[in-house]
Image (cartoon, rainbow, N blue to C red):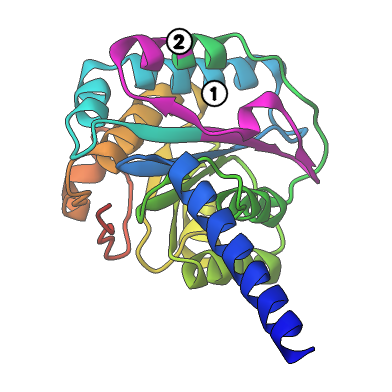
Amino acid sequence: MRNTMTFKLKAVAAALTLGLAATSASAVPVDLGLSLVIDVSGSVSTAEYNLQMDGYANAFRSSAVQQNILGGNVGAIGVNVVFFASSFFTTSLDTFAILDSVTAINNFATLLDNFARPGSGGTSISTGTNRAIGLITSTSVGIETSNWVIDVSGDGIGGSAADRAAAATAASNGITINGLAIEASSTSTTITDYYLANVITADGFVETAAGFDDFQRAVERKIQVETQTGGTVPVPGTLALLGLGLVGLRAGRMRRTA
């Protein structure tokens, strides 16, 4: 009886080992796993949604960003998109796309450019953040890296306690959260201050856009920093929005390398 039980236990252990090996073998190594968490709440108009998506698309078309993506140790990154309002929206962009060539990057940019808005509603940043964490920590994530970044963008605030809890969960899983705060004007820092206090992790930073018309500049700058080799964030002064009086702030970001 004992021999039979021992055999069964060994068989189960072997099956688990094979399962883990299969998962590891099927995961594609990348330099960075980047999850774009995008606000589509009611405060974001259709025109503003289009400006956001155009901004992301053009950021990936940027030669500087493409050089960063293809110039890493592996020469590839994985990117997915999570849309949130009062809840998250399940879309085809939940799956991480592997960007390992100019063609792949440009195809992803076109996909973003033409992606229909999945919904609207209130604002719950933590819902979007927690959804991204869940996808990253899933056994079927599909990519392998030690460098995980969640990139939250939005023009509103959520529940501060829930947002801080989501940031703590990300940190405990080795995930950095950065923020892109979309302000109402060139003199406002309301969203930036909220993101600094509640949304990002201790090793994250916030880039500020002075309205949706400034979003493309801000997101291109942000993704360029996130994809650069070594992930070193410049001193705060170099993130200043010249002529606007706003600063993209960081909190001692030191990216983990893959």
Left or right of residue 124, residue 75 in this image: left
**Residue position marked by numbered label 1 in the rendering:** 52
The picture quadrant where one finds residue 205 is: bottom left
Residue 139 visible in rendering? yes
Q: Position of residue 31 (x, y in %)?
A: 29, 42
Residue 96 magenta: yes
Dot 1 lies on which element? helix
Left or right of residue 81, residue 24 in this image: left
Label 1 sits on what residue type? Gln
Dot 2 lies on which element? helix
Judge the density around disc 2: few (<14), some (14-19), many (≥20) Cα neighbours within 10 Å: some
Q: Position of residue 4 (x, y in %)?
A: 75, 81
Height in image: 99 above or below 139?
Answer: above
Residue 140 - label: none
Height in image: 166 above or below 115?
Answer: below
- Nearer the observer, 11 or 231: 11
- For image coordinates 67% across by 76% down, the residue present is 7
Residue 182 visible in rendering? no
Residue 150 magenta: no
Q: Quadrant of the N terminus?
A: bottom right
- For image coordinates 34% across by 37% down, the residue present is 222
The picture quadrant where one finds residue 42 is: top right
Judge the density around disc 1: few (<14), some (14-19), many (≥20) Cα neighbours within 10 Å: many
**Residue position marked by numbered label 2 in the rendering:** 107
Q: How many marks?
A: 2
Height in image: 208 above or below 243?
Answer: below
- For image coordinates 68% across by 29% down, the residue present is 44
Q: Position of residue 107 (x, y in %)?
A: 45, 10
Span of residues in magenta: 80-107
In this rendering, which labeled residue sits more in front, label 2 or label 1?
A: 2
